[in-house]
Image (tube, helix red, strand yellow):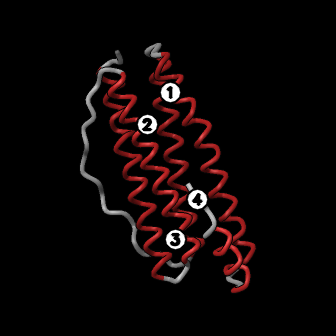
Amino acid sequence: MASEKLLKELNDQFNFELLSGYYYMAMAAYCTGEDYNGFANFFIVQAQEEYTHAMKFFDFINDMGGRVTTLAMEEPKNDYSSLVEVFEVALSHEKLVTSKINKLLDLANEENSYPTVSFLQWFVDEQLEEENSMETILTKLKRIDGNFAGIYMLDKELGQRTL
């Protein structure tokens, strides 16, 4: 059984993972509206991944004797000036997720909650992958510098992403 404080923080992360999926759906909607269907696909898959992460927290909280509580979500950013801005926001968001996971891990270590430490290690590894993915795409977009052929090729590449 986890402490009430740890269960509250795990529940907050569950809700933040749902919010992350919501943010990525807004990014997908922007990309669709701009006829970047491959980029939209990338963010739809990203949203699905975030919902999967939320369910991992949902199951873990229940396994630890807690009860999940859903919270209200804030409205995501819906308009962007460019694909570069979309990925800058996405990278910034992933860095925020990483900091939240790290704080959760710190708390689990402080409380000697070894099941929680073990559970969170997967997320530590996942966040490294998430940040690298966003950073790689952002770097490519900056190199492309608005070149239509480059954007078309990257859009096509991202359209192949699956869960």
Q: Secondary structure at mark 4?
A: loop
The x, y position of residue 53, in whole percent, is: 46, 43
Residue placed under numbered mark 4 in the picture: 162
Amino acid type at circle 2 is: Lys
The answer to which of marks 1 and 3 sits earlier in the sequence is 3
Picture layout, residue 17 above or below residue 22? above
Residue placed under numbered mark 3 in the picture: 40
Amino acid type at circle 3 is: Ala
The answer to which of 157 and 24 lies nearer the viewer is: 157
At x 46%, y 61%, the residue is 24
* Crowd class of label 2 (few under 14; some 14 to 19; many from 20; radius 10 Å): some
Residue placed under numbered mark 2 in the picture: 56
The x, y position of residue 48, in whole percent, is: 46, 54
Front: mark 4 or 1: 4
The x, y position of residue 51, in whole percent, is: 42, 49
The answer to which of marks 4 and 2 sits earlier in the sequence is 2
At x 27%, y 34%, the residue is 68
Q: Secondary structure at mark 3?
A: helix
Front: mark 3 or 4: 4
Query: How far separated are the C-alphas under marks 1 and 3?
Result: 30 Å
* Crowd class of label 3 (few under 14; some 14 to 19; many from 20; radius 10 Å): many
Query: How far separated are the C-alphas under marks 4 and 1?
Result: 25 Å
